Image (cartoon, rainbow, N blue to C red):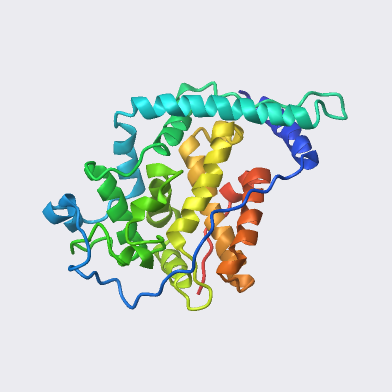
Amino acid sequence: MTTNEIEKWEAAKKEWDEIESVQQKKPRALQPVKKRQSLGVDERTSRASSFCEDHEGHVAARSFQSIWTRLSAEELTQEKTQAMDVIDRAQLSSARASASKIPYCICGTSRPNVCPLRSTTLADEQLLIVALSKVSYSETNPLHWELLCSTFKFLTDERTGRAPLARSGPHWERVGFQGDDPATDLRGVGIFGLCQLLFLVSNGLTSQMTAQLLQLSNDKVQSFPLAVVGLNWTAMILERVKQGKLNWLAVKENSFITVVNGIYRGCFLSFWKLWKTRNCTIVDFANVSNEIRDTIKRRPKSLLNMAVLTHS
């Protein structure tokens, strides 16, 4: 698509967004984070994976790009077939829902369709993103452990540490999972949920901002489960990806993964600002989450363009 075509498509889309009612969805219920005195692991009650015992738990953290490149090369034929069907059904359902509300604009023009992905590269990226959301955490895949381990190490600023990390234990609750086994929180977003968490802490935010985010998540009053909050943003973004609602941004940026990760980072920056300025607690999460969901739907470009916040 030419720049002029994209601008016309955006203008038509904006006109429809102004008259379309927002359909709120309930966010995933969150529970207050249990406080832990340290990141230490009781070896008597924790289970370590074979990768951790052998060598993977002793290596330095890997960045998002390093792991993403290798995940992209994995055999995902079955998941991609499922993803293709999911995307087709989501876009058809979205088109029918839109048509049932208002068949045409008051100006006489028809409702703009999903911006087409004429680039094979962009279409493949979209398919890969949805496919990875169908991939469950596997104990037999060393790359999955590396992804999980790297996320923990970047979050806790232990990226160069070589100390072994247990596969399960209370240390996972400290970084915002809801139990001692983080894999149980990945339902609905799969491995892609972990990919976005790793992007945030290895590339999306400065180490200072990551530390402040983790500190706030474990505050005595304003605590929230950081990892699970991130998985909520991933679920919201995936919904728009499946419906083709982010195609126009992917075309403009010439990258799907850049768009979804940029929006994801924007979600956390918006969340941080709202949570801090309003002195929110876990009971406020539903309202804050709905605001961010609305922004993803109405103004995803504003989230994509958000600059990294800095705090003293």
Q: Quadrant of residue 215?
A: bottom left
Residue 134 quadrant: top left
Q: Which residue is drawn at 36% across and 26% down?
A: 78
Q: What residue sits 43% from the left and 58% below the top?
A: 227
Instruction: Work out whether 188 lies above or below 152.
Output: above
Q: In this view, does 195 lie to the left or right of 242?
A: left
Report the quarter where the N terminus lies: top right
Residue at the farthest left position: 54
Residue 165 picture location, percent across and down: 22, 61
Picture residue at 54% right of the left edge, 54% below the top: 28
Residue 296 in view: yes
Question: Residue 45 or 269: which is nearer the viewer?
Answer: 45
Q: Nearer the viewer, residue 6 or 104?
A: 104
Count of marks overlaid on the render: 0
Q: In this view, does 143 lie to the left or right of 257?
A: left
Q: At which x and y percent is residue 8?
A: 72, 29
The x and y percentages for residue 97 are 70, 31
Which residue occupies 22% across, 56% down? 60
Q: Where is residue 209 in the image (x, y as percent from the top left)?
A: 45, 65
User: From what the image shows, is residue 290 above or below residue 187?
Assistant: below
Decide if residue 307 is in sight here. no
Left-right relation of 247 to 83: right
